[in-house]
Amino acid sequence: MLPSDVCGMNCFWEAAFRYDYMKTHPSEKMHLAVVACGERLEETVTMLRSAIIFSIKPLQFHIFAEDQLHKSFKDILDDFPYEGKVNYTLYPITFPTESAAEWKKLFKPCASQRLFLPLILKNVDSLLYVDTDILFLRPVDDIWSFLRKFNSTQIAAMAPEHEEPRIGWYNRFARHPFYGVTGINSGVMLMNMTRIRRKYFKNDMTTVQLQWGEMLMPLLKKYKLNITWGDQDLLNIMFFHNPESLYVFPCQWNYRPDHCIYGSNCKEAEKEGIFILHGNRGVYHDDKQPTFRAVYEAIKNYSFGDDLVHSLLQPLELELQKTMHTYCGRVYKVFIKQLTKSIRDLYDRRSKGR
């Protein structure tokens, strides 16, 4: 059990309920999608490792990658000790034929593939899409559970782009409509794809409501000269016109450098720790944000089956303490607070299963 001084009784009952639910629904799969192009193989594999370590229900990975990456993915993933709880499918990068080149070069290579997932994965009811630079610090099951919190109109869930409007990009610079006060970030996107495929969306292109697949190309044509962040901007425009369709989850589910480099501004993470770390702008691979890089390196180098406390948590905390000269390093404890709980919860589940 998680001790009350670490988690409190609310967290205890949440963990107990989650464990009992997973025992009685063992075959329910969680579908996770990622799009990998260019030099993103290692980063994607590290993300998948983080998903595997803590998750309870079976995982189905949908990996969209350039053809030259498929063999490397297969060689690495086939060598993982899944213990029967993970399956994966590799897909080519595909866009509508008549506009493939335009979609592929929008923002980062292949990033806009995520917009077409509801149309490609027609037999998948719900899906968690994440960028390659995501790290799960608690079970995927926990963000997956937000699907049960959707009301009758909500089709997707994302986190705000910023918590602090004074440093917000959309509210200061955007030349297009965006959701809410500071926009939304699409690096972690939970989707009820059945609802997405069925919905007719309000838009500013026609008085007629359009379905998802009908709306994408006209939206790009209207706004392509005004968007900076590619497909994320298009999603912001969509949900600006359909705000009732979005469930907004707190910032600790999509924690980025902007939450600490100007001073800590994700209050939920300060209280509960980071649940999902998002190392955007390449911070896992340079020295600009060593706190983020330390977490990435710790998970990348962890060997499945090793003791998580001695092989992951303790070495990571030592590395994080070396980053206290940076703003993010000053709040380094938020980077291990939830990770500590996740490890204790995992060992508790294992002891119950004996």
Image (cartoon, grey):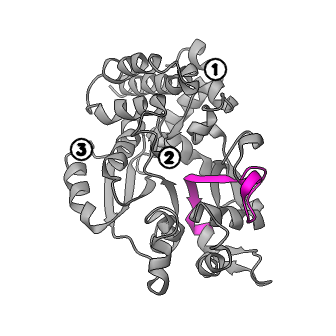
Whether residue 276 sits left or right of residue 211 in the image: it is: left
Q: Position of residue 317 (x, y in %)?
A: 43, 18
Q: Secondary structure at mark 3?
A: loop
What residue do we see at 51% from left, 54% from top?
128
Q: Secondary structure at mark 1?
A: helix
Q: Position of residue 242 (x, y in %)?
A: 75, 66
Judge whether residue 122 can be spotted in this image.
no
Tell me the CA gap for discs 1 and 3: 36 Å
Tell me the CA gap for discs 3 and 2: 28 Å
Which of the labelled discs sits on residue 80, or is there none?
A: 3
Tell me the CA gap for discs 1 and 2: 38 Å
Looking at the picture, tell me which residue is in the foreground, 170 or 247. 170
What residue do we see at 25% from left, 32% from top?
303
With respect to residue 12, does 208 lie above or below? below
* Residue for badge 1: 9
Which of the labelled discs sits on residue 168, or is there none?
A: none
Q: Position of residue 137 (x, y in %)?
A: 47, 34
Binning the other alpha carbons within 10 Å of mark 2 as few (below 14), some (14 to 19) or many (20 upward) gives few
Query: Circles 3 and 2: CB distance less than 8 Å?
Result: no
Tell me which amino acid carries mark 1.
Answer: Met
Judge whether residue 306 can be spotted in this image.
yes
Binning the other alpha carbons within 10 Å of mark 3 as few (below 14), some (14 to 19) or many (20 upward) gives few
Residue interval drawn in magenta: 170-195
Whether residue 323 sits left or right of residue 44 in the image: it is: right
Q: Residue 152: name its quadrant.
A: bottom right
What residue do we see at 65% from left, 61% from top?
155
Q: Secondary structure at mark 2?
A: helix
* Residue for badge 2: 281
Disc nearest the viewer among 1 and 2: 2
